[in-house]
Amino acid sequence: MTRNRIITAAVVLLLLLLGFGLLNGRHDSIQTVTSLTLSDNLDSIAYYPNNSLMVVQSGEFRAYDINSQKRTVLSQSLRDLDNSDSVQVSSDGKYILFHLTRASEGTALGNQLAARNLDTGKDYWWLYSIQNKTYSPLEPGTLTAQFYGDTITSLRLVGTSEQLVLYDTKTTAVDGRISTATVSDFAKASSGYVVIINSQASYTTDGVVYRVIGPADKIVGASSDGRVVWRTGSKLIQFDSKKQSTKILASHVYGSQVWSNNSFVYTTYKSEQLTASTQHLWVYDMAKNTKVEWRLDKKLNQKVISPVSLLASKAVVLKDDTESIYLVVAQH
């Protein structure tokens, strides 16, 4: 079993004033205050409600309060959890959705798979109820999964074809499924889905009829009102599934983009050559249709950074080009 190494991250405070413009964005500064310890498994860091991060450490799900710096254990200790490589938390903080590369035989999760006559040698997506302390695997062949309101949307491989499957979060019962063409990424969008097929974004409600929207590399996320954001080249595109319209949200985008509820964080550069001095860090609020720039201090502005996680516009986890991790906290 691979152990997560532990590294030190810098906690950075950003003072945000109320109100900022969409077109110009607000410019704010940050300064280093103290330090903390986080797992360096970047995929096991996620947003958790109430100003907290959810991390996987020592086989446990733990909530880390960014204000008090206290940790709360959310699960019993299971060594298999150290094999998780993708973790999400529901918006109400009651469920954790995670991908497990393997569950060892004889462990709690391995025994649960065996009891269901499922192959313990394969990878699975799991849903963990924080309140009930229960683990439920999604269907075999699930390639990826994500929360969407009170449901879970997943992409599942069945033989040589694929299905988009909708689950009830509370019971993991299947609410619906549609067969689809081979897709590289997807998002639930109001009454339909946006899928990427052969580097083209398309909209479908039934998996049979597709409306091609335009070029797309990777979906960033979907808002609660049916808008989907994806990246194509160095641009971020928004698609409104209700109006069936698109618009450019940002250009000169680089690195990763991270979604949390109705907000996402991204980075841009202002010239053709990316350097630490030309980079900009932005948080975009889909509910308010506003963006704000988080202007880095001299210490971080000397590093090329990329987002790892976003806490509902309140904090951003960043990594630099040396894989060091920084927690940037917004305080009002």
Image (cartoon, rainbow, N blue to C red):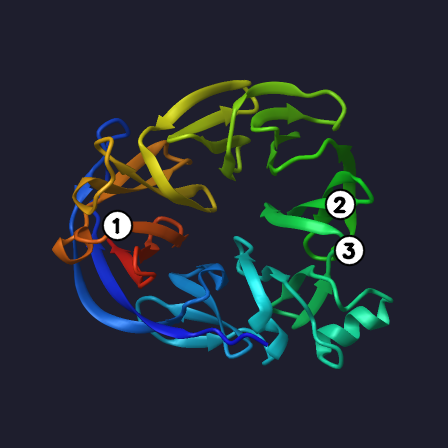
| Residue 137 x %, y % | 73, 61
Query: Is the residue under label 1 in contact with that under label 2 (CB below 8 Å)?
Result: no
Cα separation between marks 1 and 3: 39 Å
Residue type at the position of mark 1: Val
Q: Say what amino acid the circle numbered 2 marks.
A: Leu
Q: In which quarter of the image is residue 197?
A: top right
* Residue 68: image tag: none
Separation of residues labelled 2 and 3 (CA atoms): 8 Å
Q: Indicate left or right for 323 with 131 as reference.
A: left
Residue 207 falls left or right of residue 317: right
Q: Residue furthest left?
A: 298
Q: In which quarter of the image is the N terminus?
A: bottom right
Element under label 1? loop
Q: Residue 201 location in percent, x, y?
A: 57, 26
Q: To which residue does mark 2 refer?
A: 157
Which residue is the site of mark 1? 304
At x 64%, y 65%, the residue is: 128
Which one is nearer the viewer's eye here, 152 or 102? Answer: 102
Measured along the vertical axis of the image, is residue 178 above or below residue 97? above
Instruction: Decide if residue 54 is on the left or right side of residue 107.
Output: left
At 22% across and 33% down in the image, what residue appears?
A: 270
Tell me whether the residue at label 1 lies in contact with that at label 3, contact meaning CB atoms closer than 8 angstroms.
Answer: no
The amino acid type, in three-letter code, at marker 3 is: Pro
Q: What element carries label 3?
A: loop
- The secondary structure type at the circle numbered 2 is strand
Q: Name the residue under label 3.
A: 140
Measure the alpha-carbon separation of dots 2 and 1: 37 Å
